[in-house]
Amino acid sequence: MVQGQPIIDVTLDGIETRKNTRFQDKQLGALKLPVYSGDDDISGVIEVRMNKQKKIEHLGIRVELIGRIEILNDQKQSSDFMSMSRELEPQGFLFEDKTYKFQFQKFEKQYESYYGNTVRLRYYLKVYMVRSYGKVQKEVDFAVLIPQPELEEQPQTSLKLEVGIEECLHIDFEYFKSRYHLRDVVTGKVNFYLVKIKIKYMELAVIRKEQYGQGPQQQTDNETLVKYELMDGCPQKGEVIPIRLYLSGVDVTPSVKNVSGKFSVKYILNLILVDEDDRRYFKQQEITIYRKK
């Protein structure tokens, strides 16, 4: 009878009382991960079970804490931005199930976890036993969230833009803020000064733009997260249409720029006018989204 491989289990300390967060990953589906931030340590217990074997020869057992950026459709561009390692057992033999305690104190939390369409920034523990013919390993993911109180404290500026088609259309619109927290409300107004085309409706969309790669190899993935109708029917000259869009129901994350030289995540407000001939007129404006303390 062929014996099975040893089994590795990892139990994190304090997991019952630790806050969780959810991510929707394109490949892995819905994820619910424990959250670490600030000066949090990560610690726990690792159990290596013999799985009906009497003796296991190995070349060492280790635990690693890894921060990794994965470019999902080009693994050559993926890389670790952080790695810490602890030896649990030097080369030798196991004759019975063993448990090991581990701790990584106040590990560096440089970037926030991110699970996108083309990019994944993940933190995970990897426990592995090296054997002469390969590895037995177990990975456990967790999340790092980073509040940005400095963005909350800075004074806000409004964003004003104009859309014009000579002698046919002249509007301007204003968003009252340029920075929004994850559960904020986008507010503003649209002023119609000249309307000589028959507008069918107007809508506001939130677009997430993932950019990865460098220089000529840079690629962009655009995803429309939500579309919200601001107006149905043709406006009159002088009409003012209010803008109010709640971000709490939209799958937004903090904006990030050039993370470890690998990727950026931007958010765009796209104001769209559609006329009776289904021609579309639009104006895009980047906004900053941040995590409140």
Image (cartoon, rainbow, N blue to C red):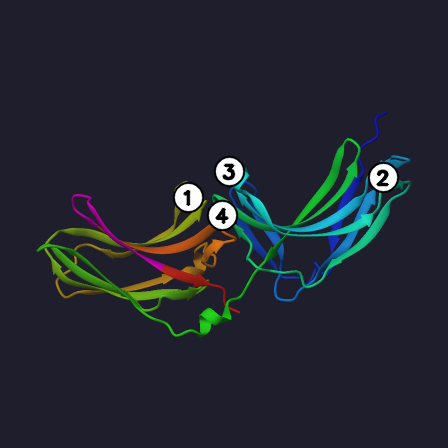
**Which comes before the other along the chain, label 1 or label 2?**
2
Q: Residues within 10 Å of mark 2 (few under 14, many from 20)?
A: many
Q: Which-is-in-front pick, marks 4 and 3?
A: 3
Under circle 2, the secondary element is loop
| Residue lying at the far top of the rendered structure | 1
- Disc 4 from disc 3: Cα separation: 14 Å
To which residue does mark 2 refer? 50
Q: Residue at image x 86%, y 47%?
A: 98
- Front: mark 1 or 4: 1
Q: Which mark is residue 116?
A: 4
Q: Earlier in the sequence, mark 3 or mark 2?
A: 2
Provide the major secondary structure of the magenta segment: strand
Say which element carries label 1: loop
- The label on residue 74 is 3
Task: Where is residue 285? Give x, y as percent.
Answer: 31, 58
Using the image as rendered, state which of residue 272 and residue 40 is in the foreground. 40
Q: In the rendered structure, which disc, 3 or 1, sits on the residue that comes first in sequence?
A: 3
Residue 284 on the magenta segment: yes
Q: Is residue 125 left or right of residue 6?
A: left
Locate the N terminus by quadrant: top right
Q: Which residue is mark 1?
A: 218
Q: Quadrant of residue 230?
A: bottom left
Label 1, label 2: how far apart the Cα atoms are: 48 Å
First of labels 4, 3 by sequence position? 3
Q: CA distance from mark 1 to mark 4?
A: 16 Å
